[in-house]
Image: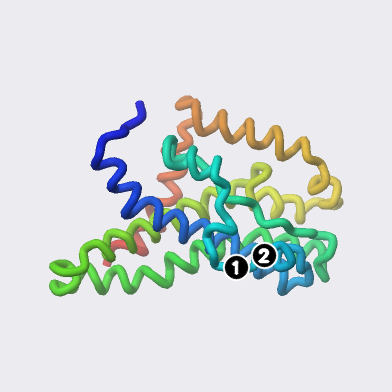
Amino acid sequence: MLNFNSSYWLNVLFFFLPAVLLVLTLHEFGHAYAAYKMGDETAKAMGRLSLNPFRHIDWIGMLTLLLFRFGWGKPVPVDFFALRNFRKGLVVVSLAGPGMNFLTALALAPLYKLMVHSPVMLNNFSYFIILTKYIIIYSVYLGVFNLIPIPPLDGSKVLYAMTKHPQRWLLDDRLNYYGVLVLLVFIMFPIFHFDAIMNAIVMPILKLFLWA
């Protein structure tokens, strides 16, 4: 059941939205930067090699994220066939998004631990402590989620690169269509215990980042 009380929307406005915008922006920027360094200038030409969050927002994905806590950003356009090394580039560009999320969490973890042990920060800057915690949590969740090897998630492209003919899988749009359906089934139907599986993977990582 959806919760639309005032405390929910205050939490969304001051913590959820800033954290998610930053995490999604860094994720997509990671893809764009890796593609550019590997020889594909498509993302740069389309203005996606940017840290401006509005260049990376998919408004429908953001709306569903606000309402159902499941959403998406605007995928970075990548011409994988323009990369200098197709197979290596496929892996590097695909892992760059989740990698950026994990690096974000790793970089912020020492700052978070320093702040939660500082009376001055706890008494005067609690907002920044909570926001930092949100950013770390969403960074880890987004990074892990995108490593799932189901199209169109990043993990699927890493899986393609391990096959004999990765181009065949990459060009088959049906995989993305059916992959989204499979993901929705896994997420929406409790019988698959999707949340429990995600938490079993994510919680040990968050313990390293959030608990001293």
Determine contact: label 1, label 2, CB under 8 Å. yes
Amino acid marked by disc 1:
Ser
Q: Is residue 122 above or below residue 60?
A: below
Residue under the image location 45 percent in, 49 percent down: 201
Count the numbered circles shown. 2
Q: Nearer the viewer, residue 202 or 47?
A: 47
- To which quarter of the image does residue 98 belong? bottom right
The residue pinned by badge 1 equals 50
Helix, strand or loop for disc 1: loop
Helix, strand or loop for disc 2: loop
Number of the label disc, if any, that sits on residue 88: none
Task: Work out how far the residue at label 1 is from the one at label 2, CA to CA, in angstroms.
Answer: 7 Å
Residue 82: give x, y in percent of width and height: 83, 64
Number of the label disc, if any, that sits on residue 47: 2
Q: Is residue 148 above or below residue 97?
A: above
Q: Nearer the viewer, residue 62 or 161?
A: 62
Amino acid marked by disc 2:
Gly
Circle 2: is it few (<14), some (14-19), or many (20+) Cα within 10 Å? few
Residue under the image location 81 percent in, 41 percent down: 172
Residue 132: give x, y in percent of width and height: 33, 63
Residue 5: give x, y in percent of width and height: 26, 35
